[in-house]
Every structure is written in structure tokens, then in C-alpha cells.
């Protein structure tokens, strides 16, 4: 059966998650996370991948991207995954799979749900108990948004400003700091499965549109995720277990 969440739509925002094979901590050393980041930069440069946020943890990665309709997401994920794995296996004299076969993609509506997903990625390592603040984890989009490098930039700041309706780079940094601070005070710091297990997250109208676009490509159902007008499209647990195995992303 074709996978619904692997059919990208031009203009859509996607939250991508990819985890290491068999839940192994193959990215536990920063040098390997930095190599993943290097290939993410190469994907942006080669294919024009529009990156809005990212983080590399010890056993999985998160990417928030916008689809430009040029098949750049699929090409980028193939490049990043293959080169990261090849370098690691060569250095370790290792054979075998580095990543799970499939990465997961969740469509996110370009409204408050986008902002919530952006911050959800920022707080990943806080939920894991590894750091007390997002800025303490080096390989993440939080640090790039707050301290944009002179070279080798990955995040598309202009696209972020457009999506957040902010006029200047300074406005973006201040607003981002505020969103993260508010989330750290109010969030439960527990994993929210809708951001990593769903095919689409957003308003009822948005997920209805995505479901219509999917047509008969997948066995999906529309469910209300929360009482705050957030809805999501999810595959039955039996299908997710068969294709992706037990979930461990946070």
C-alpha cells in the first residue's frame, strides 16, 4: 500500500522524523551529529531544501521543512541519510543499517500549529532530560535562529519571517525566545505523539483538505487530538507498527 505520508504537496510544511536503526544511539557523539548537520547544509545548497528548524539527538533527528514542489525533500533525505551512514560505518568499520528504513512525515498547517511544532522541536532534548535549555544542545535550529552564523546557514530565515508575519530578524529572534520561554513554563515536557505519529496536524478544515488530497492512497481516519481545535490524520496503530515498528522519537 502506498504510504500516505510520503506523498508531498507543494507549499506544504512538513515535520520529518528519522530514527537510528533498532533505536540505537548511533548519533550519541557530537562529531556524528555535526556530520549529519553538514549533509543537511549540503542538501539545502544542492537541492534548495527550505529548512525552518532542525535538531539531531542521540538516536533520531527532526526536520521542519517547506515543500517547494521540486522533489527536493526526497532527494535531500536520501543524501543526508546515505552520506551520514556511509561516513559512520566507514569510520567504525561497521556494516549494517544505520537508519530505520523509512522516515516519517507529518504535514503541519501554517498557523499556530506551525509555531507549536517549531517550539516542540526546540524542546526535544529538554524532554529527554539531557539539557535544561535548548541553547545547551549544539546541533539544533534554536541556536542558529538566535545566533545566525556568518557562513553555512541552514535555516531559511526569510521564510520563517514570512510564516510568522515578523518584519525583521531581530523581531524573529525576540519572538522565538518568547515562544520557547512560554513553552518551558507551561508545557508538560512530555512527548506529544501528534507531531510525530500523524499524517497531518492542524485545524479541522486543514486536515480535511489533506485527507481529500490523499484520496484512496492510504487507510486513514480523522480524529480530534485535543480540545484546542487541533485535529490530526492518523493511521491505525496496526499499520504504523507493521511499517515503522515501535515509536521512540521524542
Image (spheres, rainbow, N blue to C red):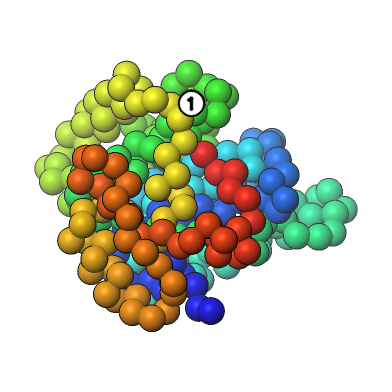
Q: Residue 64, position in %: x, y?
A: 39, 52
Which residue is outermost to the right?
93
Identified at 45% across, 30% down, the residue is 190
Q: Residue 32, position in %: x, y?
A: 67, 43
In the displayed structure, 48 sits above or below 21; it is below
| Residue nearest the observer in this picture, 99 or 236 | 236
In this picture, residue 246 sits left or right of residue 124: right
What secondary structure is marked by label 1? helix
In this picture, residue 222 sits left or right of residue 26: left
* Within-10-Å neighbours for mark 1: few <14, some 14–19, many 20+: some
Identified at 32% across, 61% down, the residue is 222
In this picture, residue 133 sits left or right of residue 169: right
Identified at 48% across, 61% down, the residue is 236
Q: Residue 246, position in %: x, y?
A: 63, 50
Identified at 49% across, 28% down, the residue is 127
Residue 24 visible here: yes
In the displayed structure, 144 sits above or below 79; it is above
| Residue nearest the observer in this picture, 65 or 36 | 65
| Residue nearest the observer in this picture, 176 or 40 | 176
Residue receiving disc 1? 126
In the displayed structure, 109 sits above or below 208; it is above
Residue 134 visible here: no
Amino acid at each position: 500500500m502506498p504510504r500516505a505520508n510520503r506523498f508531498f504537496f507543494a507549499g506544504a510544511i512538513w515535520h520529518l522524523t528519522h530514527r537510528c536503526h533498532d533505536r540505537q544511539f548511533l548519533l550519541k557523539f557530537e562529531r556524528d551529529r555535526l556530520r549529519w548537520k553538514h549533509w543537511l547544509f549540503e542538501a539545502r545548497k544542492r537541492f534548495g531544501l527550505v529548512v525552518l528548524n532542525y535538531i539531531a539527538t542521540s538516536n533520531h533527528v527532526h526536520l521542519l521543512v517547506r515543500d517547494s514542489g521540486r522533489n527536493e525533500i526526497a532527494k535531500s533525505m536520501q543524501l543526508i541519510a546515505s552520506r551520514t551512514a556511509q561516513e559512520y560505518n566507514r569510520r567504525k568499520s561497521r556494516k549494517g543499517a544505520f537508519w530505520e528504513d523509512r522516515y516519517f512525515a507529518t504535514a503541519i498547517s501554517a498557523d499556530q500549529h506551525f509555531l507549536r511544532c517549531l517550539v516542540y522541536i526546540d524542546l526535544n532534548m529538554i524532554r529527554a532530560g539531557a539539557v535544561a535549555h535548548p541553547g545547551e544542545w549544539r546541533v539544533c535550529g534554536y541556536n542558529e535562529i538566535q545566533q545566525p552564523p556568518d557562513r553555512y546557514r541552514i535555516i531559511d530565515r526569510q521564510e520563517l519571517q514570512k510564516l510568522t508575519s515578523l518584519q525583521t530578524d531581530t523581531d524573529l529572534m525576540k519572538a522565538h525566545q518568547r515562544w520557547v520561554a512560554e513553552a518551558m513554563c507551561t508545557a508538560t515536557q512530555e512527548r506529544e505523539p501528534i507531531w510525530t505519529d500523524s499524517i497531518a496536524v492542524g485545524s479541522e478544515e486543514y486536515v480535511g483538505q489533506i485527507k481529500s488530497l490523499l484520496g484512496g492512497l492510504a487507510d486513514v481516519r480523522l480524529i480530534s487530538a485535543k480540545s484546542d481545535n487541533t485535529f490530526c490524520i492518523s493511521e491505525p496503530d496496526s499499520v504504523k507498527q507493521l511499517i515503522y515498528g515501535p515509536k521512540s522519537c521524542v
